Image (tube, rainbow, N blue to C red):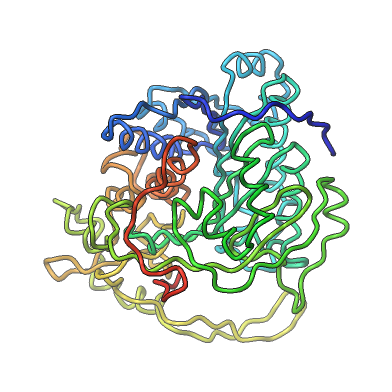
């Protein structure tokens, strides 16, 4: 799958990126890019991002709720077709080429890596959803073949991606990095816990930035690997510039072929059966540089959230004006919720006849209001008792679930963003479980621009104490 990619003349980012959003959902990337545009305009700078094309298709979704919300909010109708069909449609690809996109953003399907599944069931990139990665690869490949390579790529996935699959931790990520290398991209990645940057939800995700070899960013990243590697992951990548980190362990380096199949065959897990990839790194020129980083201890979160103090779940709940009765937990059901949230050891027998105890630790019940919320997942909606759903105690003393407007706010969307005829509360919760923190996108996008300095933030020394939150 090696692709010849001639070295083009080094260029800077365009005045305005023409953006393609793939696996678009309700438009989390789109909204985050618009936030970055608004922040620039407030400083007297021009817009830098214009989303010109979106693709969103849920194979099992009869009503395509996400695409409907996307169109209603942005006035741009996503192409509701399987991405592989789009790539095989010459007329549709001609339309994309005519748009001359310079940037691709995507929260590519993560079902095969999701922490909602036991690790033994993780199918990784070999799974039905996982193979859709090759849709992104083919889109980038098509633009290269057209003589107009996409200059920058911004991707998001669950943090477990860097240690998938369970049978050979890290192999899937090695394949993705090799895939991008084969197309002439230098890649950086960083696992981000949004709560550590002042956002109201502690959603941990891996963000990946790829820059084409024809860009000045690529040359700067490559040059940075020849210097002090202890500075590489905290200073040289747009991710670290956007979301400051400190190095927790020394950077290690190893070869990784740009040939996808060679990378797959040669990859081996590290000692102890762990992934060779730490939570931050760079892959460029056939080599990986990776190390563990931690978020720096911030003193002021204004650059990220607009206020000095970190946001909490309580801040979001306090803005809610009214709560439908259906979101309150009846007294008769509280014992069911206490059991779902409580610690337990349940005897079970596997399909092969092996007897074991299934154990779970206790969850906070109700959820604490003085800190960021836990991660929203797709099963947040519905009235049934659940270990993972959020429950808060309202000002009236009653226990209740979060309303859709609160889930939207926890991701950085305006309240009512997903409110649309035919989209019920359960569907709205699912849409937010599949979304991302829009403010994180805005920060990263700003740092990806040549002419835009990274946000100014007050922080402790990068060799000092970190501000760490559990998942």
Image position, residue 40 (x, y; %)? 33, 34
Answer above or below: position of 246 versus 152: below
Q: Where in the figure is residue 332, as x and y percent of width and height?
A: 26, 73
Q: Residue at x 59, y 60 (%)?
A: 280
At 78% from the left and 40% from the top, the residue drawn is 182
Name, please, the residue furthest toward the front: 227
Q: How many marks?
A: 0
Residue 371 image point, x, y percent: 29, 69
Considering depth in this image, is 121 or 74 the residue closer to the camera?
74
Front-lying residue, 357 or 32 = 32
Q: Compared to 355, does 422 lie above or below?
A: above
217 to 190, vertically: above or below: above
Image side of residue 174 versus residue 396, left or right: right
Residue 54 in sight in this render:
no
Closer to the camera in the image, 14 or 178? 14
Asked if residue 281 lies left or right of residue 205, the reply is right
Q: Position of residue 2 (x, y in %)?
A: 84, 38
Task: Say which quarter of the image contains residue 420.
Answer: top left
Residue 112 visible in this rendered orientation of the protein = yes
Q: Which residue is rendered at x = 48% and y = 48% of the image?
A: 434
Q: Is residue 279 left or right of residue 375?
A: right
Q: Quadrant of residue 250?
A: bottom right
The N terminus lies in quadrant = top right
In the image, residue 376 above or below residue 408? below
């Amino acid at each position: 799958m090696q692709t010849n990619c001639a070295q083009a003349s080094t260029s800077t980012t365009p005045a305005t990126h023409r953006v393609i959003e793939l696996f678009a959902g309700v438009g989390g990337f789109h909204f985050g890019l618009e936030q970055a545009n608004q922040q620039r305009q407030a400083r007297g700078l021009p817009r830098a991002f214009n989303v010109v094309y979106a693709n969103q298709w849920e194979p099992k979704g009869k009503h395509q709720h996400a695409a409907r919300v996307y169109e209603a909010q942005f006035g741009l109708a996503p192409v509701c077709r399987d991405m592989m069909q789009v790539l095989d449609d010459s007329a549709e690809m001609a339309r994309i080429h005519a748009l001359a996109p310079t940037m691709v953003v995507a929260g590519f399907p993560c079902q095969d890596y999701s922490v909602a599944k036991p690790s033994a069931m993780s199918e990784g990139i070999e799974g039905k959803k996982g193979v859709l990665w090759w849709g992104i690869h083919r889109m980038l490949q098509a633009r290269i073949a057209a003589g107009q390579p996409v200059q920058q790529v911004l991707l998001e996935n669950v943090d477990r991606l860097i240690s998938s699959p369970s049978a050979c931790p890290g192999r899937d990520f090695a394949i993705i990095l090799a895939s991008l290398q084969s197309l002439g991209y230098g890649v950086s990645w960083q696992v981000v816990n949004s709560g550590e940057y002042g956002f109201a939800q502690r959603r941990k995700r891996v963000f990946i930035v790829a820059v084409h070899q024809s860009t000045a960013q690529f040359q700067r990243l490559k040059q940075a690997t020849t210097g002090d590697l202890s500075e590489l992951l905290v200073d040289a990548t747009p991710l670290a510039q956007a979301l400051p980190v400190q190095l927790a362990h020394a950077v290690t380096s190893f070869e990784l072929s740009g040939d996808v199949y060679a990378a797959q065959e040669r990859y081996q897990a590290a000692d102890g059966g762990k992934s060779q990839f730490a939570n931050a790194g760079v892959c460029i020129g056939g080599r990986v540089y990776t190390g563990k980083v931690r978020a720096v201890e911030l003193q002021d979160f204004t650059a990220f959230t607009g206020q000095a103090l970190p946001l909490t779940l309580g801040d979001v709940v306090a803005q809610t004006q009214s709560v439908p009765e259906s979101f309150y937990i009846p007294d008769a059901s509280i014992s069911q919720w206490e059991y779902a949230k409580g610690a337990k050891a349940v005897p079970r027998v596997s399909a092969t006849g092996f007897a074991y105890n299934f154990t779970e630790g206790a969850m906070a019940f109700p959820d604490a209001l003085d800190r960021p919320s836990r991660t929203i997942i797709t099963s947040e909606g519905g009235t049934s008792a659940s270990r993972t759903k959020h429950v808060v105690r309202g000002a009236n003393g009653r226990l209740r679930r979060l309303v859709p407007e609160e889930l939207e706010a926890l991701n950085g969307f305006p309240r009512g963003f997903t409110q649309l005829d035919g989209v019920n509360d359960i569907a709205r919760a699912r849409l937010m479980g599949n979304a991302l923190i829009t403010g994180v996108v805005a920060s990263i996008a700003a740092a990806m621009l040549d002419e835009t300095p990274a946000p100014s933030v007050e922080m402790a020394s990068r060799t000092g104490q970190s501000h760490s939150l559990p998942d």
